[in-house]
């Protein structure tokens, strides 16, 4: 077995960082992938003893956990009809929010138009509200 060089370590850490997001990463899979770089399959211990590789592995596992935790609050439908119903409900909600946003946009345009008629500048309108001294 040849020695693992710094160049090899950098390349293997890149392999870990570029690992497909949908696939779990394990030391055995990393060892198999390292064969392409080294020409031989290293042991888990040989790779995990390298701080750069160990750090890349920990970061990747943290990313996997974060992605899993981010999806944990999403309810998964039990059947296709439930999924369709959920999608239709979300689409209705999107349409309602878009309508509300359009209405708010029209009100803001009206405010701006009326303010400009009164001679108020954009700078004046964008000032933060006056904070009152509540000590008195």
Image: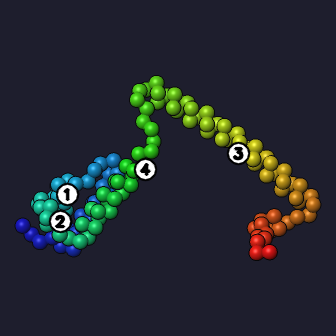
Q: Residues within 10 Å of mark 2 (few under 14, many from 20)?
A: many
The answer to which of marks 4 and 2 sits earlier in the sequence is 2
Disc 3 and disc 4: Cα gap in Å? 27 Å
**With respect to residue 67, does 75 lie above or below?**
above
The answer to which of marks 4 and 1 sits earlier in the sequence is 1
Secondary-structure class at tag 4: helix
The answer to which of marks 1 and 2 sits earlier in the sequence is 1
CB-based contact (under 8 Å), mark 3 and mark 4:
no
The residue lying at 20 percent from left, 70 percent from top is 50
Q: Position of residue 41 (x, y in %)?
A: 12, 59
The answer to which of marks 3 and 1 sits earlier in the sequence is 1
Q: Is residue 70 visible?
A: yes
Q: Which residue is mark 2?
A: 47
Horizontal side of 33 relative to 119 (left or right) equals left
Count of number-bearing discs: 4
The residue lying at 64 percent from left, 36 percent from top is 95
Quarter of the image that includes the C terminus: bottom right
Give the label, 4 or 2, closer to the camera. Answer: 4
CB-based contact (under 8 Å), mark 4 and mark 1:
no
132 and 63: which one is in front?
132
Q: Which residue is mark 1?
A: 27
Q: Which residue is mark 3?
A: 101
Give the label, 2 or 3, closer to the camera. Answer: 3
Q: Position of residue 51 (x, y in %)?
A: 23, 71
Horizontal side of 88 relative to 43 (left or right) equals right
Horizontal side of 15 relative to 127 (left or right) equals left
Q: Residues within 10 Å of mark 4 (few under 14, many from 20)?
A: few
Disc 3 and disc 1: Cα gap in Å? 49 Å
Q: Which residue is mark 4?
A: 70
Q: Is residue 17 visible?
A: no
The answer to which of marks 2 and 3 sits earlier in the sequence is 2
């Amino acid at each position: 077995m040849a020695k693992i060089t710094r160049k090899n370590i950098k390349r293997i850490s890149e392999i870990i960082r570029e690992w497909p997001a949908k696939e779990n990463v394990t030391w055995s899979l990393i060892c198999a992938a390292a064969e392409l770089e080294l020409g031989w399959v290293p042991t888990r211990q040989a790779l995990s003893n390298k701080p750069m590789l160990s750090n890349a592995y920990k970061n990747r596992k943290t990313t996997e956990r974060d992605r899993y935790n981010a999806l944990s609050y999403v309810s998964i439908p039990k059947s296709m009809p439930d999924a369709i119903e959920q999608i239709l409900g979300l689409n209705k909600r999107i349409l309602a929010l878009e309508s509300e946003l359009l209405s708010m946009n029209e009100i803001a345009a009206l405010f701006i138009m009326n303010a400009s008629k009164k001679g108020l500048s954009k700078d004046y309108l964008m000032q933060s509200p006056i904070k009152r001294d509540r000590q008195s």
